[in-house]
Image (cartoon, rainbow, N blue to C red):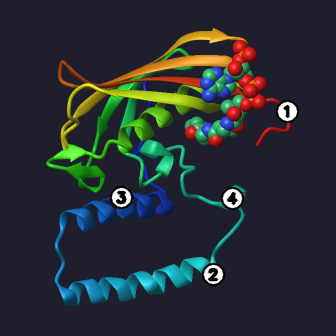
Amino acid sequence: MTVNVEASLTQHDAVVTGLRDFLDALASAAPDERSSQRLLHDLAQWTEDLRQDAVEESHRHYGRSPTLATAGQATTPWYVVDEAAPPERLAGRASFSNFFLGGRGAAHGGTIPLLFDELFGWLANSEGMPPSRTAYLTTNYRSVVRVGRPMTFTAWTDRVEGRKRFLRAELRDGDTVCAESEALFVTLRAGQP
Ligand SMILES: CCCCCCCCCCCC(=O)SCCNC(=O)CCNC(=O)[C@H](O)C(C)(C)COP(=O)(O)OP(=O)(O)OC[C@H]1O[C@@H](n2cnc3c(N)ncnc32)[C@H](O)[C@@H]1OP(=O)(O)O
């Protein structure tokens, strides 16, 4: 199954895409005093406006887009799923932009498990699956993940034992495995949040 995202954006999706671009531009820039002041002013105004529009979780748009990569979470590293065979396997492309820079051209180490958790969430909570949450997630950093590089990933279900789903994933730059992850997702019992 091929998954097409970002084919046609709603107004809200376009805002989230704009936010992602904004964060990247901010992280890449060294604005002068005047620009910083203007930015602060505009941000404060928008923060106030948006606070007026606050709604319950179930009514929010943010992070719930079926059409955007990362479901519209602007602070998750960008990825797109090219091959989806849930709950068994996912494969696709990812990229860590400047917003995710840790230092010396390398992605921040905490953002890599964030991507893995997202991919495992896709697998474990795919359509028809009972809801589950991460019990643990380990990451081995094998080689530096460079910001701006086109990466590929594979994530798959290793085994299932009752309520426990053991998942694995790899993140590659070309033929080089940069990071590997293993996680346990546990199916929630009735009444668990
Ligand atoms: C909602 C949809 C969202 C849908 C939206 C999806 C978006 C993507 C989401 C990504 C996923 C997340 O990040 S979720 C957010 C991060 N995760 C969390 O907040 C989870 C917090 N922890 C919990 O809520 C709980 O600890 C659970 C649900 C994980 C497990 O608690 P429980 O249900 O009481 O389970 P329990 O009986 O203790 O354990 C069941 C079995 O799992 C084993 N087990 C449990 N924890 C561990 C562990 N850390 N390491 C080893 N093994 C463990 C036990 O030994 C037992 O094995 P045995 O004796 O049966 O052999």
For label 4, the residue is 57
Under circle 3, the secondary element is helix
Q: Amino acid at mark 2?
A: Gln
Residue at the farthest right position: 191
Q: Which mark is residue 8?
A: none
Q: Residues within 10 Å of mark 4 (few under 14, many from 20)?
A: few
Residue hosting label 1:
190
Vertical arrangement, residue 96 with respect to residue 13, above or below? above
* Place of residue 104 in the rendered image (x, y in percent of width and height, measured from the top left): 14, 49
- The picture places residue 125, in percent across and down from the top left corner, at 62, 30
Rendered location of residue 143, percent (x, y)? 21, 28
Name the one closer to the observer, 167 or 17: 167
Q: How many residues crowd around disc 3 within 10 Å: few (fewer than 14), some, or many (20 or more)?
A: many
Quadrant in the picture for residue 54: bottom right
Q: Tell me the tag on residue 52.
A: 2
Q: Position of residue 12 (x, y in %)?
A: 50, 62
Disc 3 marks which amino acid?
Arg
